Amino acid sequence: MTTVPPPAAPVPEPISPVQAAALRDGVLPPVEEVRPGIWTLAVPFRFGVPDATLVYVVEGTDGALAVIDPGWSADGSLDELRDALVSVGRRLEDVSLVAVTHLHADHLGAAAAIRAQTGARVAMHRLEVEALRREWADAVANDADIATWGLPEELRAGVVDAWGSGRRIGLGRTSEPYADLFLDDGDALPIAGRTIRALWTPGHTAGHLCFVDEADGLLFTGDHVLPRINSGIGLGGRTATNPLGDYLSSLGRLDVYADLEVCPGHEYRFRDVVGRAKTLALHREERSRHVARALDALHEPTLFEVAARVPFSGGIESMTGFLLASALTQTAYHAALLGRSAEIRPA
Ligand SMILES: [Zn+2]
């Protein structure tokens, strides 16, 4: 069947002319000072879309540097970060903390290399470390789910390769999963003279954190809220809760930060996080309606048959591997949120 994509939602304007120009020209944006002693730079990520991560560097009053989401390092080299720090008169050796929003390789990837080269402590939510340690067990458990989805035979192997036991475990890691410091909701990052607090925002992954710097008027959102991309849901291993429900609650947690400038993990900085969160929540409501309509129309469908009626951008017919797995799991989360999981027949 043909599907009609939903009308394009409005997206926020970039704050920074250099980030906007870089995006238009398809190049990495240059280092930029966001606030006195707070810089952003971009690090390439060669394994997926988006293909660059925005990294933030925060200087304490003692001169020590904290890095929020160091991005990806293919081989342990830290050239972009080192060069960026030199360009603003600082040194890689001054990094004493790496704070990570979530476990994905394009955010956490370079943490181990920085730690090895500088002795910096790595800080993240406990759930992310647990998910990384469970990665293989989760992938094997996913195989059993995939077998029930009713996938056409020719698509199944690609989904197992991307989502199940065929997936690359440990992509972007050069050491065992670890953290020197677990961050809980409300914890302040150990940066001298600044108060930047962790805000637990599960959904994209179970232990996703945003970081709130009210004094500087900044909200670091990782992949929880991006200016143009709809964040993926439930991409941090298996959870006991519905990641979609978690995500919607986490969007609601941003309501009190309407005045802060948003520093996301990709694309560009923008304002009006509340407006953007509302757009993202509306997108989810719309998708829930499509899943409900599919369930109304079909008798004992498989998950694949339900998902085939949801107008994912590009259409499910064009999807394979990771994208297809993500579309199917999202469909399952929507059905669960509607209280209608039982209507889907395991194949
Ligand atoms: Zn990301």
Image (spheres, grey):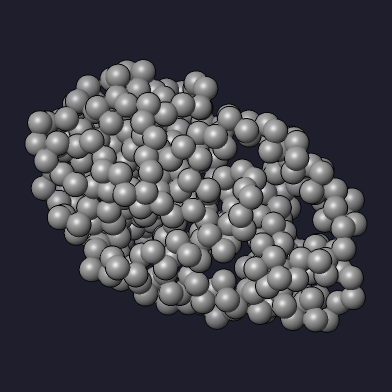
Above or below 185: residue 129: above
Quarter-wise, where is residue 272 in the image?
bottom left
Residue nearest the observer in this picture, 170 or 253: 253
Quarter occupied by the N terminus: bottom right
279 left or right, relative to 42? right
Above or below 14: residue 240: above
326 left or right, relative to 101? right
Quarter-wise, where is residue 316 in the image?
bottom right
Residue nearest the observer in this picture, 136 or 71: 136
Quarter-wise, where is residue 141 in the image?
top right
Q: Residue at x 39, y 70 (%)?
A: 276
The percent coordinates of residue 19 (x first, y second) are 29, 56
Q: How many marks?
A: 0
The percent coordinates of residue 230 (x first, y second) are 51, 63
Residue nearest the observer in this picture, 25 or 230: 230
Q: Residue at x 80, y 81 (%)?
A: 296
The percent coordinates of residue 202 (x first, y second) are 49, 53
Q: Residue at x 22, y 22 (%)?
A: 93
Quarter occupied by the C terminus: bottom right
Q: Is residue 3 visible?
A: no
The percent coordinates of residue 189 (x first, y second) are 26, 40
Residue nearest the observer in this picture, 24 or 171: 171
Q: Is residue 262 visible?
A: yes
Q: Residue at x 15, y 51 (%)?
A: 35
72 left or right, relative to 204? left
